[in-house]
């Protein structure tokens, strides 16, 4: 699914944000990415999702060598990825239903297909009774489930979550992780960056530790 070979990333200066990273992630694997602030976690996500290019090395994601990906191909490439951010980035002027539907609108899906898919996922995340509400009127946990539904609606092969539980209390973090694990059983690959070491204790998962851009540990926790 993801293969890095000697990946380096510098932003012009002497410092390497990523230094000689080599590892492989299989389809369906659940991987935590940990490491102190500035370790390079978000940078790695930017490379994997083709928002930025590596300075050197080879990166293959879902069969695409990202060095060879042309600008025009990037939107198509990114359709395979679902993103979940710390602050969710929900649209306040759109309802729960519309927020979840949005990726399909962008993809140009037909109305009846959109409806079918939204109704299916909205039920999976338990928000069917909140479809017409606006994000500001939802609890933190409900907003988080909207973000998950929106990331999954276009059936991505890979979910990239950058500090998804950063603003949540332990109970909500656990419920989010449980949803992640459930979807991961369907073969979706998960990459989850977190500072919250408590999350790692819940289930068996692979943990990659970065420090100053270097992969210092690759273990099953
Ligand atoms: N656009 C940029 N220009 C210059 N340097 C950058 C840029 N983006 C990131 N960096 C540097 O790359 C290093 C890694 O940053 P990154 O954001 O990947 O860390 P992180 O592990 O995600 O940290 P955090 O846990 O705080 O989110 C940092 O030293 C940062 O200053
Ligand atoms: Mg970061």
Image: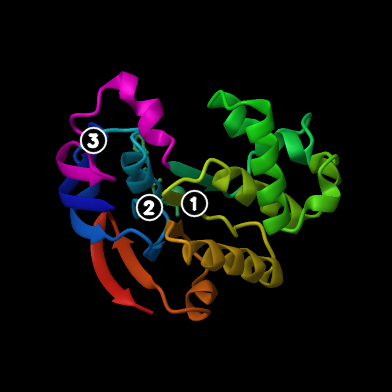
Q: From this viewpoint, is residue 205 visible?
A: yes
Q: Secondary structure at mark 1?
A: strand
Q: As displayed, is residue 11 above or below residue 81?
A: above
Residue 66: mark in rendering: 3
Q: Secondary structure at mark 2?
A: helix
Q: Nearer the viewer, mark 3 or mark 2?
A: 3
Q: What's the residue at 53%, 27% (across, down)? A: 107
Q: For the residue carrying disc 2, how many other residues have a C-alpha within 10 Å: few (<14), some (14-19), or many (20+)? A: many
List x then y, in percent, for residue 70.
Answer: 25, 22
Question: Which sits in the foreground, 21 or 116?
Answer: 116
From the Cβ of disc 1, is ligand 2 less than 8 Å away? Answer: yes
- Circle 1 is placed at which residue position? 162
User: How are the residues colored?
Assistant: rainbow
Q: Is 59 colored magenta in this rendering?
A: yes
Extent of the magenta region = 55-80
From the Cβ of disc 2, is ligand 1 less than 8 Å away? Answer: yes
List x then y, in percent, for residue 172.
Answer: 69, 66
The tag earlier along the polypeptide, 1 or 2, is 2
Q: For the residue carrying disc 1, how many other residues have a C-alpha within 10 Å: few (<14), some (14-19), or many (20+)? A: many
Name the quarter where the C terminus is drawn: bottom left
């Amino acid at each position: 699914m993801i293969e890095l070979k000697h990946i380096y990333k510098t932003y012009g200066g002497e410092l390497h944000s990523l230094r000689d990273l080599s590892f492989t992630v299989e389809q369906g694997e659940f991987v935590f990415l940990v490491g102190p602030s500035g370790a390079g976690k978000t940078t790695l996500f930017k490379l994997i999702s083709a928002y930025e290019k590596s300075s050197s090395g080879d990166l293959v994601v879902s069969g695409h060598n990202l060095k060879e990906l042309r600008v025009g191909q990037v939107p198509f490439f990114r359709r395979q990825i679902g993103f979940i951010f710390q602050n969710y980035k929900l649209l306040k002027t759109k309802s729960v239903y519309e927020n979840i539907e949005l990726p399909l609108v962008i993809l140009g899906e037909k109305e009846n297909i959109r409806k079918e898919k939204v109704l299916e996922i909205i039920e999976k995340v338990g928000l069917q009774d909140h479809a017409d509400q606006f994000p500001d009127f939802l609890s933190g946990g409900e907003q988080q489930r909207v973000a998950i539904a929106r990331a999954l609606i276009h059936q991505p092969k890979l979910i990239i979550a950058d500090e998804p539980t950063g603003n949540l209390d332990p109970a909500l973090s656990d419920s989010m992780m449980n949803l992640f694990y459930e979807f991961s059983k369907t073969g979706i690959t998960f990459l989850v960056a977190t500072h919250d070491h408590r999350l790692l204790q819940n289930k068996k998962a692979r943990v990659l530790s970065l420090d100053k851009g270097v992969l210092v540990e690759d273990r099953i926790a």
